[in-house]
Amino acid sequence: MKTSLSLAQLPLTFCEEFALIDLSVYNPDIPVENAYLEVLVPDLPAPVRLNYTVSGVTVLTTQNLKLSEGCTEIPSGLYVIVQTIKPNDRLRETHYVFNTIPERKMLACLVSEYIRECKDLDMLFEIHASLDIVERLAKEAYCAEANKLFNTASNKLHSLCVACV
């Protein structure tokens, strides 16, 4: 049996944590050693190395991602995550995950406001659909396209609600 590495983002609804589940299939005849992730956080120059829970959930926080003090939310954007195990750190898999949780939180706030005021919701549904597409594009490694669509959707969202956080 051959080991196959795989990760997926768990759908959380708060901005303080980012969770990944290890969906890898491991060869039972070879012990898993030195399991770690190299996480490249948006707008940071170098990846952060973290041990991960084999066949379990690994929670990324502002502390273990070594984000600046006072930072309370995991930034939105494209995360490049390299998953590695021994022997000799030779088994590696690169994953692309797009964190859109802060934008989705802002979008939920706007939907609530728009429903109360009976405003047209078409733009909000368009932004929601764009965020879904962004996550899919990143998962399929279309990173440039994902970033471009995310920036467009995020700009529309921020223009609708600067105060909604």
Image (cartoon, helix red, strand yellow):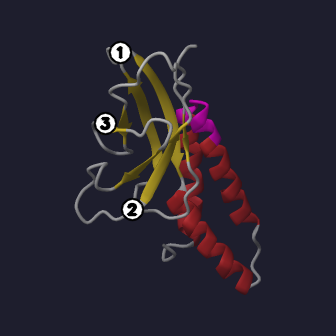
Indicate whether 134 appears above or below 32: below
Q: Say which element carries label 3.
A: loop
Q: Seen from this angle, which residue lies furthest left?
A: 69
- Locate the N terminus by quadrant: top right
Q: Earlier in the sequence, mark 1 or mark 2?
A: 2
Disc 3 residue crowd, few under 14, some 14–19, many 20+, Cα 10 Å = some
The residue tagged 2 is: 73
Whole-number angstrom distance, CA of label 1 to CA of label 2: 35 Å
Indicate whether 77 appears above or below 24: below
- Identify the residue at image location x=66%, y=58%: 127
Front-lying residue, 80 or 143:
80
- Identify the residue at image location x=64%, y=40%: 136
- Identify the residue at image location x=61%, y=44%: 134
- Identify the residue at image location x=35%, y=25%: 33
Span highlighted in magenta in the image = 136-144
Whole-number angstrom distance, CA of label 1 to CA of label 3: 21 Å
The residue tagged 1 is: 87
Q: Seen from this angle, which residue lies furthest front?
A: 29
Front-lying residue, 90 or 130:
90
Front-lying residue, 78 or 88:
88
Q: Say which element carries label 2.
A: loop
For residue 33: magenta? no
**Where residue 47 is drawn, which disc sits there?**
3
Q: Which amino acid does label 3 sit on?
A: Pro
Where residue 137 sits: x, y (%)? 62, 37
